[in-house]
Image (tube, coloured by chain):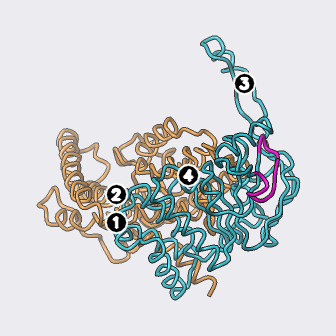
Chain colours: A cyan, B orange
Amino acid sequence: MIVMRNICKTYKVARRNAGLAEAARSFFRREYDTVTALDHVNFTIHDGETVGYIGPNGAGKSTTIKILSGILTPDSGECLVDGRTPWKNRIDHVAQIGVVFGQRSQLWWDVPVADSFELLRDIYSIPPALYKANLDELTELLSLGELLRTPARQLSLGQRMRCELAASLLHSPRILFLDEPTIGLDAVSKIAVREFIVKLNQTHGTTVILTTHDMQDIEAITKRIILIGKGRILLDGGLDDIRRGGEDIDRTVAALYRSYEI
Amino acid sequence: MKKATRFYKYIAFFRLRFVMGLQYRTAALAGVATQFAWGFMEISMFLAFERAAPDAFPMTFGQLASYEWLQQAFLAFFMAWLMEGELFDTITSGSVAYELCRPIGLYEMWFTRSLAKRLSAGLLRCLPILVVAALLPDPWKLHAPMSPVTLLCFIVTMIMGLLVTVALCMIIYMLTFFTISPKGMRMIFAFAAEFFQGAVIPLPFFPAPMQRVMEYLPFAAMQNVPMRVYSGQLAGVELFRAAGLQVFWLAALTGIGKALCAKAMQKMTVQGG
């Protein structure tokens, strides 16, 4: 179970106007603005749920994922994931979760994917039998096959994303965080990724928290959506709560963003 | 049991690095060729120097030739500029997020990773250089160590020197969390480390007062000690003093690196969204 209570997080950003004079002035006196990324965020997610975490760019989605995965420390508030505070028990915590950042890679670039997987097996201390069972299952579901023997740099984005997903699941995590997993993928790869995530949730009961800008991801995968804007939770409910009879999901969400002025 | 599994985590990096080292076949061959060319050039230069002023030479020519060949054979162990570009990219691009999702300390993970890279690169390349250099005629020849004890001292101080080198590089990685761009720091560090560790000119060739100061710097704890132990220039009390300094610097540098790492984790804001 995941509980977020009154989580706040701010960043400091150096700002100045354009131009040489301004640049020279800021060389001596730098002005910082405080940007609020998260403003008293509250939610609870139960085991086995699939949650879509949506909102415009800069709303605080990635910040939330990074706090939940122990990478960032919030300024204030409480967060418990299966009884652990992520940033305090980082090492114990991360052994139990899987994370996929759609815009980054965790595979070693120059060696076959299987070598990266074996490194992960050892880092997570996955027992050999479990590793083999998981690898076989993931290979079948994500049709990895020959991809495992290919260097990561020679994979297409869609192939690579399938491997990234597998890499994050080798240690049987109870919770999977997906930060824009379908970004840049073609239709076929998107569908493959979505179907896989749905199946994973059904067969293993893995809790899935997904951020995306692709509303079809939300329709296909998640039962619940949490809308965040300007660092605040604006809506927490089912897809049916926002659907307005027969309208295209993208338009629905755009109207939703407008109604909250985000 | 717990200790054993922790050990495996680290071994995994060595395995992957050896695999990668074997992957870059052309790089390995080119490296060996470059190091031969460089070794010959350096020895020729010192040969000219020795002929011009034999009395000013602070060691026998045999010792110098051995120093140069060992330096070339184990280049990857000590070269300060051999840092992992990937780690800098990881920090500046924000991919460090993935590294922090691993159930292992960041400092320990990167230390092992850097050590594995140097060890695999060095071990995969040293053999051809050592064998050929040992077969060369005088004055080019790599001489055998004076005794098994000397060889043992050489190996121990070389491992210590390698660890000191990695610990120094770790400080540069950690500082990148604060400066964002590693460029300037890397350049100054690489230059200083090369000069002060005796990679350009062995330390005994420096004027005595300068050499005395240089011997106490952390850089002297890198290749300077093992290369001079091998040919018997550092023995007895001097050897113990030099090895003691290696231990001291290794402890101090890892201490500083870990403190920086903890500080970086505290104020961490992952770059790039």
Q: Percent from the top left, x then y, of residue A70? A: 71, 60
* Residue pointed to by mark 3: A30
Q: Residue furthest left?
A: B137
Query: Which residue is pictured at 84% across the width and 51% down the height?
Result: A41
**Cα distance in 3D space between marks 3 and 1:** 48 Å
Q: Earlier in the sequence, mark 2 or mark 3?
A: 3
- Front-lying residue, B171 or B138: B171
Chain for mark 2?
A
Q: Percent from the top left, x then y, of residue A255? A: 73, 40
Q: Nearer the viewer, mark 3 or mark 1?
A: 1
Say the numbered circle drawn on residue B231: none
Q: Mark 2: which secondary structure?
A: helix
Q: Earlier in the sequence, mark 3 or mark 1?
A: 3
Is residue B218 at least partly visible in the picture?
yes
Q: Mark 4: which secondary structure?
A: loop
Task: For the residues labelled 1 and 2, say whether their Cβ atoms are less than 8 Å apart.
Answer: yes
**Cα distance in 3D space between marks 1 and 2:** 7 Å
Query: Which residue is pictured at 55% across the width and 54% down the height?
Result: A102
Residue B220 located left or right of residue A14: left
Instruction: Please tell me how many numbered marks the rendered image carries.
Output: 4
Query: Which residue is pictured at 73% across the width and 60% down the height?
Result: A68
* Residue pointed to by mark 1: A150
Q: Percent from the top left, x then y, of residue B245? A: 55, 59
**Cα distance in 3D space between marks 4 and 3:** 27 Å
Q: Which residues are magenta?
A: A229-242
Up-down relation of residue B175 to residue A32 (above or below): below
Say the numbered circle drawn on residue A154: 2
Task: For the residues labelled 4 and 2, say whether their Cβ atoms are less than 8 Å apart.
Answer: no
Chain for mark 3?
A
